[in-house]
Image (cartoon, grey):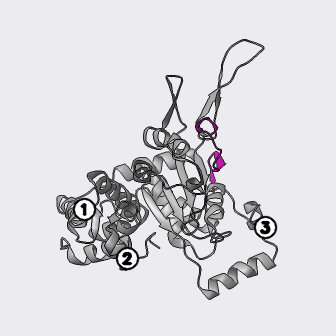
């Protein structure tokens, strides 16, 4: 299931070679393991995997109680990757994220004590509850895969993946994410209230003894490790792209800039982000080159947080997803 609420889906079958099929199957098992704890969020699970394989980061937005944190913890439990969590609060300092120099009385030196950012999977819980100064501490880590402390650059582990959660309805005690930081997220996934039958399944699992604080109680077992993730990321980079499909991405990006209800459209970096996500989705679905369907499937999650809708359009109920849907319908698709 593609990680976007859009009618466009990747084709179900492609007669490409079976190279890398075992590796793809392993990530298919990751989705199966996560489903043992998280019900009804298959699109978000796929989006998280796409973000990891594309070497990007993911922003999860949804009201409290739709399993944002559980989703990240379950995904980490299905992989043998080091995982840390930061609960962002108004009094959190940048050094609490990146680490800092700490005086050692026994040696009279200031050794560096690593912060929680030194991990493979970082859960940044309620990232918009901390001031911009601390939010910006993540910028270098997310973009450069390193942190600089006292003039020294320290590399982060490989792979490094940030999954941040955000509450879209409660604004008291929150801070707007800087535009530069939003642009560092490859994708923004929205988690909605589940339909009635899915909500019943959630209650059934809780009635049977499932404890969300202990994802292992759901029977999740690790099926992918660091080596597999790095190999898959390398395979994704090798996915091809025809010139006409690249031109299609450019045309989509330019159409967002010309849309009358948009104040700021997608930048060239946004176009490269869509290419990266489309390549990851193509690889996961067994293709050795991206198609327009892969581009369309990724357009909403990759671009919805990069558009700035004009104020008068927002008052009329126009949102980024609606603008992107119109763009996808209007721009000619290469055959």
Residue at position x 64%, y 45% in the image: 82
Q: Which residues are magenta?
A: 79-96
Left or right: where 278 falls relative to 192: left
Magenta stretch: includes residue 34: no
Location of residue 234 in the rendering, given as x and y in whole percent from the top left corner: 41, 47
* Above or below for 320 versus 154: below
Asked whether, in this view, residue 53 is left or right of residue 42, the answer is left
- Mark 2 residue element: helix
Residue located beneath label 2 in the image = 315
Residue that lies at the very extreme toward the bottom in this rendered image: 196
| On screen, residue 243 above or below 96 | below
User: Would you name the residue on which mark 1 appears?
Assistant: 253
Residue nearest the observer in this picture, 43 or 87: 87
| Percent coordinates x, y for residue 239 in the rendering | 33, 55
Pointer 3 residue: 211
On the image, which quarter does residue 223 sit in?
bottom right
Relative to 180, is 334 on the left or the right?
Answer: left
| Residue 90 is a magenta residue | yes
Can residue 71 be seen? yes
Residue 205 lies, in percent from the top left, at 75, 77
Q: Vertically, is 103 above or below 31?
A: above
Which residue is depicted at the point 47% across and 42% down? Answer: 139
């Amino acid at each position: 299931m593609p990680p976007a609420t859009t009618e466009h889906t990747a084709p179900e079958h492609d007669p490409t070679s079976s190279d890398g099929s075992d590796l793809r199957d392993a990530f298919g098992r990751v989705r199966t393991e996560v489903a043992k704890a998280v019900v009804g969020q298959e699109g978000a699970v796929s989006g998280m995997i796409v973000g990891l394989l594309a070497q990007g980061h993911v922003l999860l937005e949804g009201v409290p109680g739709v399993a944002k944190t559980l989703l990240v913890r379950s995904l980490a439990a299905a992989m043998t990757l080091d995982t840390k969590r930061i609960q962002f609060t108004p009094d959190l300092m940048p050094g609490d994220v990146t680490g800092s120099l700490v005086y050692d009385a026994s040696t009279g030196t200031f050794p560096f004590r690593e912060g929680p950012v030194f991990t493979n999977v970082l859960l940044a819980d309620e990232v918009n509850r901390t001031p911009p100064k601390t939010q910006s501490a993540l910028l270098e880590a997310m973009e450069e895969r390193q942190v600089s402390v006292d003039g020294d650059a320290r590399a982060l582990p490989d792979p490094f993946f940030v999954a941040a959660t955000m509450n879209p309805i409660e604004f008291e005690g929150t801070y707007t994410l800087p535009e530069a930081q939003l642009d560092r997220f490859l994708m923004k996934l929205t988690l909605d209230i589940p339909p009635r039958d899915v909500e019943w399944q959630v209650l059934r699992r809780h009635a049977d003894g499932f404890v969300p604080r202990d994802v292992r109680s759901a029977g999740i077992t690790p099926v992918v490790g660091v080596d597999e993730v790095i190999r898959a990321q390398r395979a994704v980079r090798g996915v091809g792209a025809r010139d006409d499909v690249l031109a299609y991405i450019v045309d989509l990006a330019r159409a967002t800039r010309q849309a009358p209800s948009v104040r700021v459209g997608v930048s060239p970096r946004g176009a490269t982000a869509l290419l990266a996500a489309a390549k990851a989705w193509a690889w996961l679905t067994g293709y050795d080159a991206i198609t327009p369907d892969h581009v369309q499937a990724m357009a909403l999650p990759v671009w919805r947080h990069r558009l700035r809708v004009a104020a008068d359009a927002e008052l009329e109920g126009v949102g980024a997803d609606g603008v992107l849907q119109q763009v996808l319908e209007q721009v000619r698709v290469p055959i």
